[in-house]
Image (cartoon, helix red, strand yellow):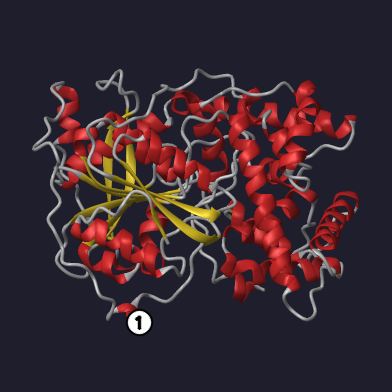
C-alpha cells in the first residue's frame, strides 16, 4: 500500500469544522519528460488590460511593493525566496511577516511568472509549485516561471498553531457524527478547545490570515516579480483567492484560471449541503464502477455497496481496527481515508484496496490515506494545514450552528447525502470556539478585469459544477469551461479538450466561447 500511496500527490486538506471540505487536485505522473512533443500555441505577451496600473501611493506600502526578491537555489534545484508583507494592512508601518516562495523557472522563454495556489485553504503553495512536473503539462512549464507561495498562516509563512500534535491526533480521530450525549459533549469540548488553542498559541497572527489579506499579499508578490499584470492558476479554494484578488485589483488581472471553482456567495450551510451531495454522487459513482467488474466485493447493487461501506464505518466506530504501526484506525480517520480517493477517479483503486483490507479486520491502508489527507507523517504533522484551514475559514466566515441545534439540520443534510449528511451537519458547529472578528466581506464582481477562465467538472465531489457556473456568472468577465467527468478540478485530468483550451488561453491569450463544454 505504501508504494501505491506514494503515487498520490495531496496538496491540500479537509476543512475541519466550518462546513466545507476542501482539497486541491490529486495528481500523479512522471517528471514531464515524455511530454516534450506536446504542441503548444504560439505565445502572446501578457500585459495589463488597462495599461500600467499605479502602485500604492502610501510610501510605507510602496516600500513593500518595491522590494527585490533574492532567489537562492533550494531543494531539488528549485529557487526559493521570501517576501515581506505587513501583518496588518491597516497598519503597514507595524509588524511584518515573511512569506515563503518557491519558483520553478520556465523550460523555455518565459512569458511571465504564473502564481499558483492548490487550495485548502491551508495547503502550502510552495509544494504545489515544486510538484509542477506532475501538476502542469509541458506547454505551461515551457512558457511560465511557476511560482508558489505559502499564504500567510500556512506552511513556512508565519504558520498559525492551534494544537499539539497529540491533541490534533485526537481531534482528527474523534467521531465526526456523535452518536450519544457523551460523544456530543466530547465533540463540543474538542471544537471549543481548537478555537481557544488558536488564540492562545498564535496570538494576533490568527486575526490576520484572511483570504482578503492573502489576496493583498499576492499583489505585493506580483510587483516584486516585476509583472505589470498577474498570471494566476488557482485550484479549489485557490479559485476563491483568485476571485478575491480580481475584485481588489481588477486592473492587474492578466490571465486567470480558476479550476474547481467555489461559489463565493454561499454561506457555510449552503456550501455544506451541496458538498455533501457532491460526495454522495462521487461515492455512488465509485460503487457503480466497482459493479462493472466481475467480482465487486461491495455487493451486487449500489445500495448493497453503500450498506457495506456504512456498515464498516459503524463497526469501526464501535471497535477501532488495529494497524501495524500500533495506532488504531478510529472512526474519524476512517472517514478521511474514505473521502480522500473520491477526489480523483484515478485513485479509486486505492479506496478499493483500503476497504478490502478494512473489511478483513486491518486498518493500515485507510489510516495511511487519512494521514495523507491530514499531512501526518511517521513522526508527526508535515505542515500546519489542518490548523490553517480552520483559522482561515473561520476568519472569513465565523458563523456557526449551536451544538444543541445540529439535529434540526439532519433532515436536509440526510436528503442531500444519506451517507455523509450528518457529518456535514455537525461540521456547521466548527467555528463555535473561534471567537474572533470576521474578516473583510466583499461582493465579488471584478468589474473591468480581463477575461477570467472558470473551470468546473460535472461530478466534482468537492466543488460541484454549479459553483463554477455561479462564479462565472458573478464575475463580470467570467468565461465558463465545463468538463464532463469525475474527480476534483479539470486541468490535467485526461481531457485533452480542457487541457488545450486552458493552455491556449494562458499561453496565447485565446479566450474560449462562453460556455465551452468538453
Q: Which quadrant holds residue 184?
A: top right
**Image location (x, y in percent) of residue 419:** 77, 48
User: Which residue sits at x=79%, y=25%?
Assistant: 408
Q: Which quadrant holds residue 30?
A: bottom left
Reply above or below: 138 against 80: below
**Image location (x, y in percent) of residue 92:** 26, 22
Left/right of residue 280 with respect to residue 447 in the rendered view: right
Reply above or below: 118 against 17: below
Quarter of the picture containing the N terminus is: bottom right
Asked whether residue 291 appears in the rendered view, the answer is: yes
**Image location (x, y in percent) of residue 415:** 76, 39
**Image location (x, y in percent) of residue 217:** 30, 35
Q: Which quadrant holds residue 352?
A: bottom right
Left/right of residue 381 with respect to residue 204 in the rendered view: right
Reply above or below: 74 against 64: below
Quarter of the picture containing the C terminus is: bottom left
Tally of marks: 1
Q: In front: 499, or 216?
A: 499
User: Which residue sits at x=9%, y=37%?
Assistant: 52
Tag 1: Cα neighbours inside 10 Å, few (<14), some, or many (≥20)?
few
Asked whether residue 377 appears in the rendered view, the answer is: no
Q: Tell me the residue that label 1 is attached to.
A: 34
Q: In front: 515, or 301?
A: 515
Left/right of residue 430 with respect to residue 202 in the rendered view: right
Kind of element beneath mark 1 = helix
Residue farthest left in this picture: 52
User: Which residue sits at x=82%, y=37%?
Assistant: 178
Amino acid at each position: 500500500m505504501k508504494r501505491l500511496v506514494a503515487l498520490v500527490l495531496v496538496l491540500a486538506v479537509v476543512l475541519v469544522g466550518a462546513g466545507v471540505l476542501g482539497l486541491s487536485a490529486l495528481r500523479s505522473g512522471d517528471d514531464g519528460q515524455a511530454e516534450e512533443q506536446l504542441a503548444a500555441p504560439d505565445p502572446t505577451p501578457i500585459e495589463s488590460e488597462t495599461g500600467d496600473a499605479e502602485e500604492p501611493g502610501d510610501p510605507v506600502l510602496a516600500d513593500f511593493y518595491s522590494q527585490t526578491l533574492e532567489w537562492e537555489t533550494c531543494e531539488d534545484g528549485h529557487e526559493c525566496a521570501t517576501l515581506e508583507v505587513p501583518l496588518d494592512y491597516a497598519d503597514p508601518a507595524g509588524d511584518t511577516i515573511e512569506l515563503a516562495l518557491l519558483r520553478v523557472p520556465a523550460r523555455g522563454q518565459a512569458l511571465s511568472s504564473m502564481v499558483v495556489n492548490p487550495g485548502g485553504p491551508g495547503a502550502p503553495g510552495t509544494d504545489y509549485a515544486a510538484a509542477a512536473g506532475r501538476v502542469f503539462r509541458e506547454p505551461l512549464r515551457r512558457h511560465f516561471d511557476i511560482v508558489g507561495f505559502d499564504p500567510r498562516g500556512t506552511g513556512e509563512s508565519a504558520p498559525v498553531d492551534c494544537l499539539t500534535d497529540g491533541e490534533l491526533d485526537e481531534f482528527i480521530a474523534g467521531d465526526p457524527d456523535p452518536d450519544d450525549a457523551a460523544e456530543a459533549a466530547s465533540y463540543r469540548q474538542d471544537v471549543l478547545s481548537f478555537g481557544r488553542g488558536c488564540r492562545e498559541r498564535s496570538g494576533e497572527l490568527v486575526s490576520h490570515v484572511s483570504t482578503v489579506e492573502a489576496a493583498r499579499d499576492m499583489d505585493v508578490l506580483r510587483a516584486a516579480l516585476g509583472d505589470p499584470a498577474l498570471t494566476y492558476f488557482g485550484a479549489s479554494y485557490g479559485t476563491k483567492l483568485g476571485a478575491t484578488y480580481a475584485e481588489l485589483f481588477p486592473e492587474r488581472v492578466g490571465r486567470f484560471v480558476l479550476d474547481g471553482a467555489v461559489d463565493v456567495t454561499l454561506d457555510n450551510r449552503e456550501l455544506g449541503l451541496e458538498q455533501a451531495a457532491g460526495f454522495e454522487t462521487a461515492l455512488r459513482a465509485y460503487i457503480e464502477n466497482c459493479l462493472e467488474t466481475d467480482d465487486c466485493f461491495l455487493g451486487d447493487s449500489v445500495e448493497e455497496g453503500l450498506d457495506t461501506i456504512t456498515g464498516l464505518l459503524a463497526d469501526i466506530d464501535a471497535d477501532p481496527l488495529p494497524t501495524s504501526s500500533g495506532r488504531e484506525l478510529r472512526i474519524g480517520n476512517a472517514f478521511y481515508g474514505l473521502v480522500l480517493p473520491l477526489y480523483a477517479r484515478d485513485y479509486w483503486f486505492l479506496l478499493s484496496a483500503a476497504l478490502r483490507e478494512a473489511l478483513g479486520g486491518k486498518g493500515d491502508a485507510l489510516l495511511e490515506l487519512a494521514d495523507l489527507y491530514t499531512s501526518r507523517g511517521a513522526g508527526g504533522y508535515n505542515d500546519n494545514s489542518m490548523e490553517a484551514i480552520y483559522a482561515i475559514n473561520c476568519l472569513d466566515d465565523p458563523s456557526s450552528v449551536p451544538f444543541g441545534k445540529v439535529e434540526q439540520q439532519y433532515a436536509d443534510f440526510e436528503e442531500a447525502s444519506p451517507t455523509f449528511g450528518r457529518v456535514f451537519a455537525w461540521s456547521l458547529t466548527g467555528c463555535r470556539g473561534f471567537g474572533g472578528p470576521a474578516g473583510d466581506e466583499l461582493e465579488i464582481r471584478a468589474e473591468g478585469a480581463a477575461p477570467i477562465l472558470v473551470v468546473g467538472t460535472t461530478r466534482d465531489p468537492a466543488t460541484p459544477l454549479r459553483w463554477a457556473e455561479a462564479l462565472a456568472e458573478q464575475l463580470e468577465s467570467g468565461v465558463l469551461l465545463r468538463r464532463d467527468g469525475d474527480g476534483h478540478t479539470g486541468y490535467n485530468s485526461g481531457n485533452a479538450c480542457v487541457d488545450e483550451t486552458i493552455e491556449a488561453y494562458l499561453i496565447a491569450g485565446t479566450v474560449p466561447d462562453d460556455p465551452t463544454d468538453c
